[in-house]
Image (tube, rainbow, N blue to C red):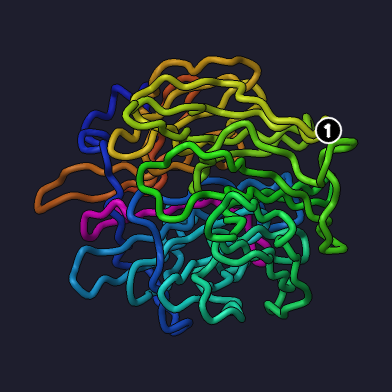
Amino acid sequence: MRMSRIGSVPCALATLAVAALLGCGDDAKVPSGDPGVDAGADTVADAGEIDMGKDADVAPRWALIARADDSPSASTKVVAIDLRTGKPEGELAYVGIASVRGRGVRAFVIDRDRDRFVALDPARPWTAAWTHEPKSEDAPIAATIVASASHAFVLRPTVNSIEVLELEGGKHVADVDLSGFVDPLDPDGRVDATDGFYDATAGRVYVVLARHVPNDPLQRCTASKPLLVGIDATKHAIVDLNGEADGQAIVLAGQWPQPPDGGGFLDESAKVLHLVDQGCYEPPSTAPVGAGIERVDLAAGTSSRNVPSTLATPLSSLLRIDASLALVRTAPPELVWRAWNPSTTTLGAVESGMPVVAAVDGKDVVGLVERTMEGGTTMDVVRFDPRDRSLAFVAENVLRGARSVRASLVVARATGGS
């Protein structure tokens, strides 16, 4: 059913504030598949669109959702919802807390505790295609994985290199050395590769090197600056992004780029990368320095803070709807979305109807909303149009389980099948 205005469905949004209650429908099919993954984040996790197919005109087919319960022996289910029918097509069950993420053309389940990740089958994303365990024994699992048309680039913040794997089968084919980008002022000697974006038109993978001071809960300002580096997606080699300037990387304008939970988007046609920066702090002041959205001009090799933020809560996520509309979310505990026109330098009004957990399907938002029902709470999968604030239910009362903010959602196109 379709509601004309978001205000027409107050019950579906009554408990939205930090809602990420995720479960699965009773009719979901459970394959025998992989024995389990234990991973994820303590807050609302990755959101965005991935293109799992070669036909860009095909509408996204799947909503891939990971949810964990709150029991002492936490378990997680990754559920695939068919966006055409609203039915759960299948699920993967894991031990521990898992998250599903997608950057590029494939979706992956992250397993931090076991130091591995699972590539999902693009035709049947409720099944595991292959599993990879990074070769470095002392390195936690990837912060994110960026998939090009043929390879997966594994980014791990504690390792100064990027593993390159074949997208089909997961065979290791190369390592991209990042040690030349270590800042001498950074005491841990790590480049902190935290996020990445695939540019299909340029055949490049762009990687954010945060170069943080390790384990600093205060996010204090330092002389070390984050960088953006480019990698040739075919040759697996560093490319020069800054022209005549020294080095090969673009020096970013901010200092604390947001980790990969939807903290940026690439505009391939304009050759511009928009990144959320949480800002840093200079005690005793509690106001963040340099917080906002920065605009990285990939053609010119420059970066500037395009949208300053004076909000008390840092920004955390950024979704692109179209050339004139994006949505920006604040970090927990607020978790509020605001509209933004990427051609302007100011944030717009609060989008009160936006689901907290959200992804983009190419034209609208696919999201998860929590509502109260007899005997507890449940989650609905919805489509939300931020242009007119209309809401349509995709799947009602199909995701239920324990309350948790450890939720992750991506939408994906399908390959193979109908």
Q: Is residue 132 visible?
A: no
| Residue 212 screen position, x and y as percent | 52, 49
Q: Is residue 210 left or right of residue 317?
A: right
Name the residue: 44% across, 78% down. Answer: 114
Q: Amino acid at mark 1?
A: Ala
Dot 1: few (<14), some (14–19), or many (≥20) neighbours within 10 Å?
few
| Residue 384 screen position, x and y as percent | 44, 33
The residue identified by callout 1 is: 299
| The quarter of the displayed image where residue 218 is located | top left
Q: Main secondary structure of the magenta part?
A: loop
| Residue 68 screen position, x and y as percent | 30, 63
**Chain part drawn in magenta:** 397-418
Work out whether 4 lies above or below 405.
above
Work out whether 16 lies above or below 52.
above
Position of the N terminus, as image quadrant, is top left
Please name whichever residue, 301 or 325, is drawn nearer the observer in this view of the structure: 301
Q: Is residue 414 visible?
A: yes
Q: Is residue 196 left or right of residue 29?
A: right
